[in-house]
Image (tube, rainbow, N blue to C red):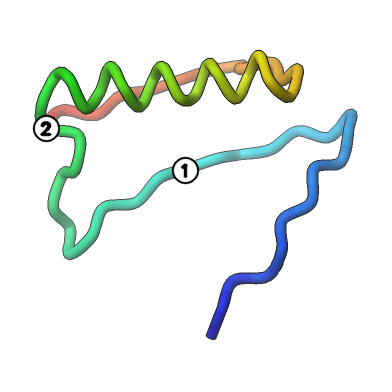
Amino acid sequence: MPRSIRRFIPGHIWHITHRCHKKEFLLKFARDRRRYLWRLFEAKKRYGLCVLNFMEGDP
């Protein structure tokens, strides 16, 4: 079943997670983690979001 369309509603708090495929850690390389953070903060700038917390697990 396809995922429903996500709508950005100004003024609301969002809890965003990312999940791994088959319980494999997908950001095990430093370059992948850097790219993920870059994309996160580019989205922050683009949409005017405020990142309240970020937590990175061990590879």
Picture residue at 76% right of the left edge, 17% below the top: 48
- For mark 1, give the secondary structure: loop
Q: Where is residue 30 in the image (x, y as percent from the top left)?
A: 14, 18
Q: Where is residue 44 in the image (x, y as percent from the top left)?
A: 63, 19
Q: Where is residue 52 in the image (x, y as percent from the top left)?
A: 61, 16
Mark 2 and mark 1 in contact? Answer it, CB < 8 Å: no
Q: Reading the chain from its start, which is encountered first: label 2 or label 1? A: 1
Instruction: Answer above or below: position of 31 versus 25.
Output: above
Residue 13's quadrant in the figure?
top right
Q: Which amino acid does label 1 sit on?
A: Thr
Name the mark on residue 28: 2
Q: Distance between the residues labelled 2 and 1?
A: 17 Å
Q: Position of residue 47 (x, y in %)?
A: 73, 24
Badge 1: few (under 14), some or many (20 or more) residues near its Cα, within 10 Å?
few
Given residues 19 and 3, the one toward you in this image is: 3
Instruction: Name the residue at the bottom extreme.
Output: 1
Query: Is 5 positioned to the left or the right of 18 in the image?
Result: right
- For mark 2, give the secondary structure: loop
Name the mark on residue 39: none
Query: Is 43 positioned to the left or the right of 38 in the image?
Result: right
Picture residue at 49% right of the left edge, 24% below the top: 40
Instruction: Answer above or below: position of 43 versus 27.
Output: above
Q: What residue type is labelled 2?
A: Lys
Question: Which residue has dot 1 on it?
Answer: 17
The nearer-to-camera label among 2 and 1 is: 2
Q: In which quarter of the image is the C terminus?
A: top left
Picture residue at 10% right of the left edge, 26% below the top: 29
Query: Is 29 positioned to the left or the right of 52 in the image?
Result: left
Badge 2: few (under 14), some or many (20 or more) residues near its Cα, within 10 Å?
few
Query: Is 52 positioned to the left or the right of 6 in the image?
Result: left
